[in-house]
Amino acid sequence: DMVVGHTRPDGHAGGSGDFGGHDAGTIKGHRGSVLHFLRDPSDHDGEGQAYEYFEDGILVVEHGKVVHCGDAEDVKSRYPHLEIEDHTPHLIVPGFVDCHVHYPQTEMIAAYGEQLLEWLHSYVFPGGGEIWGHEQ
């Protein structure tokens, strides 16, 4: 079992299977094929696997943080009242962060902030025009 975050003495991560007094809306399961990494695969020393894959798995999220994942039947028995959103047959891979960047905006990263549209018109669009060969 993967457990991330705080673990109570009874072994449950974050609230109990019956939500332990938590608002049911703060904990949710996402069902699908789940692939998650236990360690950096490039640092893998040959001891055990660097990842776990559950063909039919559930990822449990509480207050926006992953608190558990595992085989769907095991997770359902551990969290019997869990609201589950079914994403099958899709693959769920937790941990990705959207770190993309738009090339014309690279010079503006961490620039002085204004209201979004004012900032775009004053700083970003002029830079993009130079790249695309025309003014915005």
Image (cartoon, helix red, strand yellow):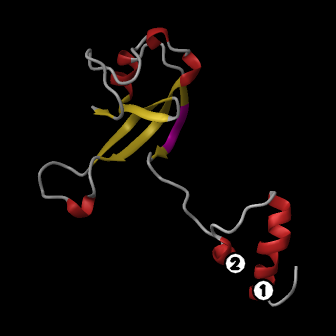
Q: Nearer the viewer, residue 117 or 23?
A: 117
Residue located 26% across and 51% down the image: 39
Left or right, 59 with respect to 46, comes to right
> The magenta stretch spans which residues?
86-90
Inspect the magenta stretch and tell me whether residue 123 lies in it. Answer: no
Q: Amino acid at mark 1?
A: Trp
User: Seen from this angle, which residue lies furthest bottom?
Assistant: 133
Residues under numbered marks 2 and 1 in contact, where contact means CB atoms less than 8 Å apart: yes
Question: For numbered disc 2, what is the local secondary structure?
Answer: helix
Q: Is residue 16 above or below residue 115?
A: above
Q: Quadrant of the N terminus?
A: top left
Q: CA distance from mark 2 to mark 1?
A: 9 Å
Q: Is residue 78 above or below residue 71?
A: above
Q: Amino acid at mark 2?
A: Pro
Please name the residue that numbered disc 2 is placed on.
Answer: 104
Q: Is residue 78 above or below residue 120?
A: above
Q: Nearer the viewer, residue 71 or 94?
A: 94
Q: Quadrant of residue 77?
A: top left
- Give the crowd class for mark 2: few <14, some 14-19, many >=20 residues within 10 Å: some
Residue 3, image x, y percentages: 32, 32
Left or right, 69 with respect to 49, comes to right
Please name the residue that numbered disc 1 is placed on.
Answer: 132
Residue 45 is marked as none
User: Main structural element of the magenta stretch: helix, strand or loop?
Assistant: strand
Residue 31, image x, y percentages: 48, 32
Q: Is residue 23 visible?
A: yes
